[in-house]
C-alpha cells in the first residue's frame, strides 16, 4: 500500500503543475490539444510498467480539459547506456516532436529525468520536464 501511494504521489505534482493549462480560453483549447510527451525509463519487463503508464494517461485525460494527447517514448537507457548515443536520441526526439507543439514533458524514472534535464535545449527540443 505504501508503494502504491508512493507511485501515485508524482501524479499529484504533475496534475498540480498542469492546472495552469486549464486556464486557457475555451476556443484555444479546442484549437490546440494539450500534448504531453512521456519519457519512459521503466524496465521494459516490469509488470507494473503497463498499468502505471495506462493509469497516468487516464488520470491526465480525466483531469485536464479535452482534448489531451499523450505520447510515450521508451528510452531504454539502462540497457543501452552508451553516452555517445545520447546526442543521437536527443536529435531524434527533437526532430520527431520539434514542430509538433509539445506542452509538457513528463519523465518517468530517474534515468529519464536525468536524460531530460541534462540535454541542451535547442529550437526543436521539447519544453522543460517534470518528474
Image (cartoon, rainbow, N blue to C red):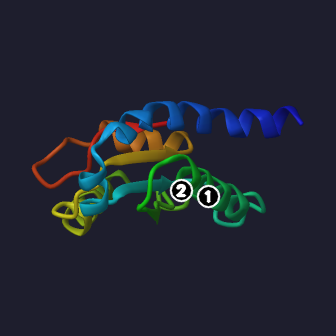
- In the image, residue 7 above or below residue 48: above
Quadrant position of the N terminus in the picture: top right
Residue situated furthest right in the rendering: 1
The residue at 20%/41% (across/down) is: 120
* Contact (Cβ within 8 Å) of mark 1 with mark 2: yes
Residue 89 x, y percent position in the rendering: 31, 61
In which quadrant of the rendered view does residue 67 lie? Answer: bottom left
Question: Pointer 1: residues within 10 angstroms few (<14), some, or many (20+)?
Answer: few
- Spatial CA span between label 1 and label 2: 5 Å
Helix, strand, or loop for circle 1? helix
For mark 1, what is the residue?
Answer: 58
Please state which of residues 87 and 101 is positioned toward the viewer in this rendering.
Answer: 101
The residue at 78%/34% (across/down) is: 5
**Which disc is residue 88 wearing?**
none
Residue 106 x, y percent position in the rendering: 45, 46
- In the image, residue 6 above or below residue 109: above
**Which disc is residue 61 wearing?**
2
Please state which of residues 98 and 102 is positioned toward the viewer in this rendering.
Answer: 102
Residue situated furthest left in the rendering: 123
- Left of 93 or right of it: where is 4? right
The residue at 40%/54% (across/down) is: 36
Helix, strand, or loop for circle 2? helix
In which quadrant of the rendered view does residue 23 lie? Answer: top left
Amino acid at each position: 500500500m505504501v508503494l502504491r501511494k508512493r507511485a501515485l504521489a508524482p501524479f499529484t505534482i504533475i496534475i498540480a503543475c498542469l492546472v495552469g493549462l486549464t486556464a486557457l480560453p475555451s476556443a484555444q483549447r479546442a484549437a490546440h490539444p494539450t500534448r504531453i510527451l512521456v519519457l519512459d525509463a521503466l524496465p521494459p519487463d516490469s509488470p507494473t510498467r503497463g498499468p502505471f503508464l495506462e493509469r497516468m494517461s487516464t488520470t491526465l485525460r480525466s483531469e485536464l480539459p479535452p482534448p489531451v494527447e499523450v505520447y510515450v517514448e521508451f528510452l531504454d537507457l539502462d540497457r543501452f547506456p552508451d553516452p555517445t548515443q545520447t546526442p543521437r536520441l536527443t536529435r531524434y526526439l527533437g526532430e520527431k516532436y520539434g514542430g509538433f507543439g509539445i506542452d509538457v514533458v513528463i519523465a518517468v524514472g530517474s534515468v529519464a529525468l536525468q536524460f531530460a534535464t541534462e540535454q541542451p535545449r535547442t529550437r526543436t527540443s521539447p519544453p522543460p520536464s517534470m518528474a
